[in-house]
Amino acid sequence: MNDPLYRTAPYERDAAGTVRSVTAEGGLIVEPPLFYPTGGGQPGDSGWLDWDGNSIAIATAIKAPGGGSILVPAEPMALPPEGAIVTQRLDWERRHKHMRMHTALHLLSVVIPLPVTGGAIAAGTGRLDFAMPEPPEDRDAIEQALNDLVDRDLPVTESWIDEAELDANPGLVKTMSVQPPRGAGRIRLVRIGEGPAQVDLQPCGGTHVARTGEIGTIVLGKIANKGKQNRRVSISLG
C-alpha cells in the first residue's frame, strides 16, 4: 500500500476512495485511507462516508492488518459494497484539534526533557507521563516556555530513516512505553524547527500541524503524581 492520505496530505478534509473490503465485524477498508487509525496515543478520526446518495457516520478508525484504516460505522446500517466509489469526509474540527495537540505534546517533551512513560491525545486536551520523581518547581515557567515555542512559529516537517539508523541513534526515541513500529523498513521522524533553530526530532506516526504557531495558546493543567517515579502533566488548547 502507498503512504496513506492522513500522512501525505494531513490537511485534506475529504477525498475519493474505493471500498476494498468489508470486515466480518462490519468495518470498511477504503483506499487510499484518509482517516487516521487509533495509535500512538492519538484517537482514530471520525466523519462520514458518502456514496450514491447515501451517507454513513464513521465513529472511529482502527489499524488494518498490513496497513491502512478500518472505518467503524457509528451504528448498524446498509454499507457500500466492495468496489464502490465513495467520498471520505473527516470531522475536520476534531482532526485539527488532534493535530494541534499532538504537536503541542512534542513541545511539552522539549520543555520537560525527561523520559516519557505514557501519553494520550484528545480534541483540545492531552497529557504526557514523565519519569519525574519530584514535581517541577515553576509551573508558570513551563507554560511560558511552551507558548514561547508556539510564538516562534517553527516549521514542522518530516523525514525518514531506516531501522539501522534508528538503532544507531537510540536517543531519538523519547517514549519508553511506545516504540516506533518496525517491519516496514523505514521510520518516520517528525522535526520541529530546522537548522540551528531545530528544537525536536523524534519518531512519530501521528498527524501534526505545519507550524507551531497554528497550535494557539497552550494552557498547563494539572501535574498529578502517578507513582514514586512518575508525574502526569496535562495541557489544553486555549
Image (cartoon, rainbow, N blue to C red):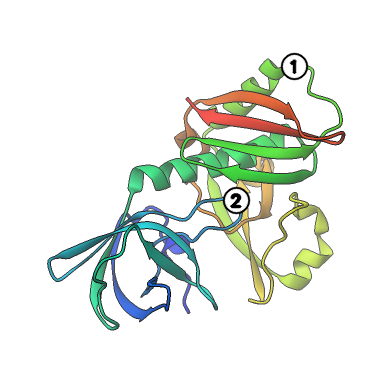
- Quarter where residue 33 is shown: bottom left
Dot 2: few (<14), some (14–19), or many (≥20) neighbours within 10 Å? Answer: some
In the depicted structure, whether residue 131 falls above or below residue 184: above
Residue, x 71% and y 56% (percent of image)? 178
Label at residue 138: 1
Residue, x 16% and y 65% (percent of image)? 54
For this rendering, which residue is in front, 182 or 134? 134
Type of amino acid at the residue the image marks with label 1 = Asp
What secondary structure is marked by label 2? loop
Number of the front mark, 2 or 1: 2
Which residue is situated farthest in the left direction here? 53
- Tally of numbered tags: 2
* Residue of label 2: 41
Residue, x 61% and y 39% (percent of image)? 105
Whole-percent x, y for residue 224 in the image? 72, 28
Dot 1: few (<14), some (14–19), or many (≥20) neighbours within 10 Å? Answer: few
Earlier-in-chain disc, 2 versus 1: 2
Q: Is residue 229 left or right of residue 30?
A: right
Q: Is residue 32 visible?
A: no
Q: Is residue 75 left or right of residue 223?
A: left
In the depicted structure, whether residue 142 falls above or below residue 44: above
In the depicted structure, whether residue 70 falls above or below residue 42: below
In the depicted structure, whether residue 9 falls above or below residue 79: above
**Marks 2 & 1, CB-CB < 8 Å contact:** no
Whole-percent x, y for residue 103 in the image? 56, 42
What secondary structure is marked by label 1? loop
Q: Is residue 37 visible?
A: yes
The CA distance from mark 2 to mark 1 is 27 Å
Whole-percent x, y for residue 223 in the image? 70, 26
For this rendering, which residue is in front, 187 or 84? 84
Type of amino acid at the residue the image marks with label 2 = Gly
